[in-house]
Image (cartoon, rainbow, N blue to C red):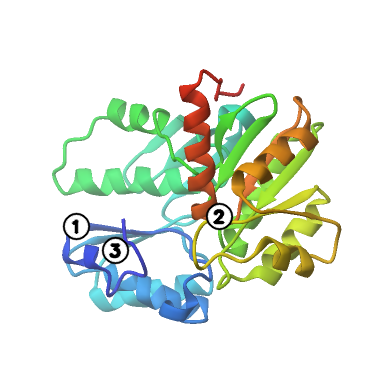
Amino acid sequence: EVGLGGRLDSTNVLDLGVSVITNIALDHTQYLGSTLEAIAAEKAGILKPDSIAITGAQPPALAVIEAAAQEQRIPLQRLGHEIELTAIDKEWAGVQATVTTPADTYRDLRIPLLGLHQADNAALAVAAIDALRSRGWEISDGALRDGLARTRWPGRLEVLDRNPIVLVDGAHNPAGLQRSLAAVQKLAKGRQLVIVFGAMKDKDLPAMLAQLRATDAPVIFSAIDWHRAAAPADLAAQFDAPAEAAESSIEALDRARQRATPNGVVLVCGSLYLVGEVIGAARARLAKGSSVSAR
């Protein structure tokens, strides 16, 4: 997986004959550019001659990737075109998907990750496996299905605890947060939702704060033990709605649990640094015998 961008990333020295570019959003703009097209150009730097390109990008970024594939004279498989997807949201059980690639159709794939958007990522993974098979890799259908069914993605709508249910999600840009909030609001229907939010100062805070306001859920802004983190009081001042500020992630989570009540849902989001702190605290609780699974 590329760390940042693609064209200049150290992972770009590798070439397995298949390159995958997922959907593209505005992030790390100080390094990659301020438009989707500019970021797509950096991502497209991983496309190489004599390879197969796969993407879930949408316009306007898609046109840049299409042009790069044409320049390299390599085939491009696009989600919604050469790759077809039908998905059913099973809510707390994850997603069930049927994926059609240029090579085959895979029905009723089980994806245990929460959020319908994860079906997009799974479809690209299935297409990548088919592309690797065309390159001589021996990967059975059973391995494909079993791999998807066993998938875990720490920090991405991950359930850490119950009574109340605690979810953590590392989405840290408006596009990612929009998808996460939509998924959680569906999962939490009929329950009290409380949001713990913390973020880095260099992120698009106005857009993300507006998304939080639109949920009408109580919000607790959390400090993060990292030098780039926005102060919780500053976030609360920009929020333009009633909110709380906590001086640590542990304090923020404790307050959120109390407000959610045992039947509610707590979402921790806005930064992978914040999510990392909360996961660490959850592991400490687990070591003391607390349950950390939800149904």
The percent position of residue 247, horizontal first and vertical second, equals 65, 53
Q: Residue at x 44, y 75 (%)?
A: 39
The earlier-in-sequence mark between 3 and 1 is 1
- Amino acid type, residue under disc 3 in the picture: Pro
- Amino acid type, residue under disc 2 in the picture: Ala
Compared with 295, 82 (above or below) is below
In the picture provided, is 243 more to the left or to the right than 17?
Answer: right
Residue that carries the numbered disc 3 in the rendered image: 75
Q: Total label count? A: 3
Quarter of the rendering occupied by the N terminus: bottom left
* Quadrant in which residue 188 is drawn: top right
Tell me how far mark 3 sits from mark 2, CA to CA: 31 Å
Residue that carries the numbered disc 2 in the rendered image: 171
SS for callout 3: loop
Tell me how far mark 2 sits from mark 1, CA to CA: 30 Å
Q: Which mark is residue 287?
A: none
Compared with 159, 40 (above or below) is below
Residue that carries the numbered disc 1 in the rendered image: 17
Quarter of the rendering occupied by the C terminus: top right
- Cβ atoms under marks 3 and 1 closer than 8 Å: no
* Quadrant in which residue 103 is drawn: top left
The percent position of residue 45, horizontal first and vertical second, equals 29, 73
The earlier-in-sequence mark between 3 and 2 is 3
The percent position of residue 33, horizontal first and vertical second, equals 46, 81
The percent position of residue 106, horizontal first and vertical second, equals 40, 34
In the picture provided, is 187 more to the left or to the right than 65?
Answer: right
